[in-house]
Image (cartoon, rainbow, N blue to C red):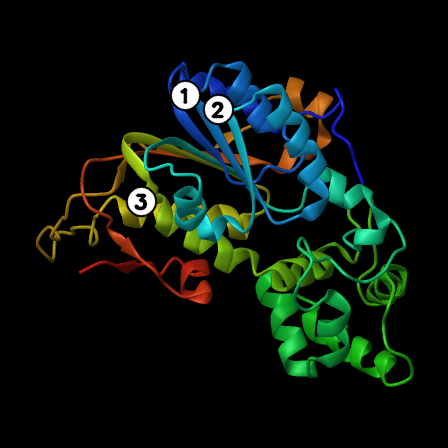
Amino acid sequence: MTIVTASHIPVLINPIMQALGGLQGKVVVDATFGAGGYSNRFLQAGAKHVVAFDRDPNVVPIAEKLAAKYPGQFLFFAGCFSEVDGLLSQANIDHVDVLAADLGVSSMQLDQADRGFSFMRDGPLDMRMGAQGLSAADLVNQLDEGDLANLIFQFGEERASRRIASAIVARRQEQAFSRTAELAGLVEQVVRSRPGHHGATRTFQALRIAVNREFDELAQLLVRSQHVLVSGGQLCVVAFHSLEDRMVKTFFKASAGEAGQASRYQPAPSVIPGSFEKFSKAIKADDEEVAMNMRARSAVLRMGTRTQHPPVVAATSEMDALRGRWRIAA
């Protein structure tokens, strides 16, 4: 179990706090509690209530310490952030001013070899953020070659996905994969590492995303944010790779309610009142933050403000959301 320490630095927290202004009297949702960095800052800034979620059972002791420090002010619920509306109902919260999410795997999960997230540390080939569901070993050992190649390509954007899948299938016929070092070593034979980039990076990313259904979770969180945030409420999402960021960016665009763009050959499109407005451009860490926290170098923050209008974007499939094909509510 990892305990949060003073060295834990929440990514892009300063630009988030600057954009939010004062939090006095506000209800804030920390959808990705992790080591508690965001929740801590929100509480220190005077939030009336901070409601935090996380599906990782290892963070419960950290949450319990924070709840003891801020009794009645901090609430924690074990669960996925796609269930945000149901979890808020359990907390009897029907008014949310800020919803923040720091996506992807946490630093402490990567640092724990027995969680199986890192290709740099040998451990069980697991990668589950929670305690249930298929592990990475299950996928690697059971998926057929075509499905495995598609998974690595779609979720990892790995151009060598077919060669990697072929090598995995050939190797597992002799012995099933059970350790991260086994898989990382095999993938590195297909995709050579280079300075600053391990050959197995994209494959491990793809498997982690698939195991935890991260893109489906994100799509549901974005859609449901329209239902839980009050008018004037703010959605803050920090992404760490292009697929996540693209999904957030296209969601904000779709939620603006624009059906398309006009041209000289066709009239202006119909416009419906948007559920979000005042979107920020992509905000990235400055040199000072990157020097203090290398994880921040790939982080991208996007923010939007909830309008008074009904939700615009309806639930959609994971792959449609990845491609920016958000379904507009009737």
Q: Could you tell me if the residues under marks 1 and 2 are in contact, i.e. CB atoms within 8 Å?
A: yes
Looking at the rendered structure, which numbered label has been put on residue 187?
none
Residue identifier under label 1: 20
Circle 1: residue type: Leu
Q: Quadrant of residue 88?
A: top left
Q: Could you tell me if the residues under marks 3 and 1 are in contact, i.e. CB atoms within 8 Å?
A: no
Looking at the image, which is closer to me, 275 or 319? 275
Neighbour tally class for label 1: few under 14, some 14-19, many 20 plus, Cα within 10 Å: some
Query: In the image, what residue occupies the spot 73% across and 80% down?
Result: 142
Whichever of labels 3 and 1 marks the residue nearer the N terminus, that label is 1
Neighbour tally class for label 2: few under 14, some 14-19, many 20 plus, Cα within 10 Å: some
Whichever of labels 2 and 3 marks the residue nearer the N terminus, that label is 2
Circle 2: residue type: Ile
Circle 3: residue type: Gln
Query: In the image, what residue occupies the spot 40% across and 65% down?
Result: 320
Task: Describe residue 281's horizontal placement relative to residue 208 as left or right.
Answer: left
Quarter of the image where the C terminus is located: bottom left
Give the alpha-carbon distance from disc 3 to disc 1, as whole Å.
Answer: 18 Å
Give the alpha-carbon distance from disc 2 to disc 3, as whole Å.
Answer: 19 Å
Residue identifier under label 3: 226
Task: Find numbered disc 3 in the image and state the secondary structure of the residue it sits on.
Answer: helix
Q: Quadrant of residue 239?
A: top right
Quarter of the image where the N terminus is located: top right
Looking at the image, which is closer to me, 95 or 276? 95
Q: Which of the two discs, 2 and 3, sits closer to the camera?
A: 3
Task: Describe residue 320's horizontal placement relative to residue 79 as left or right.
Answer: left
Neighbour tally class for label 3: few under 14, some 14-19, many 20 plus, Cα within 10 Å: many
Give the alpha-carbon distance from disc 1 to disc 2, as whole Å.
Answer: 6 Å
Residue 285 seen in this snapshot:
no
Residue identifier under label 2: 16
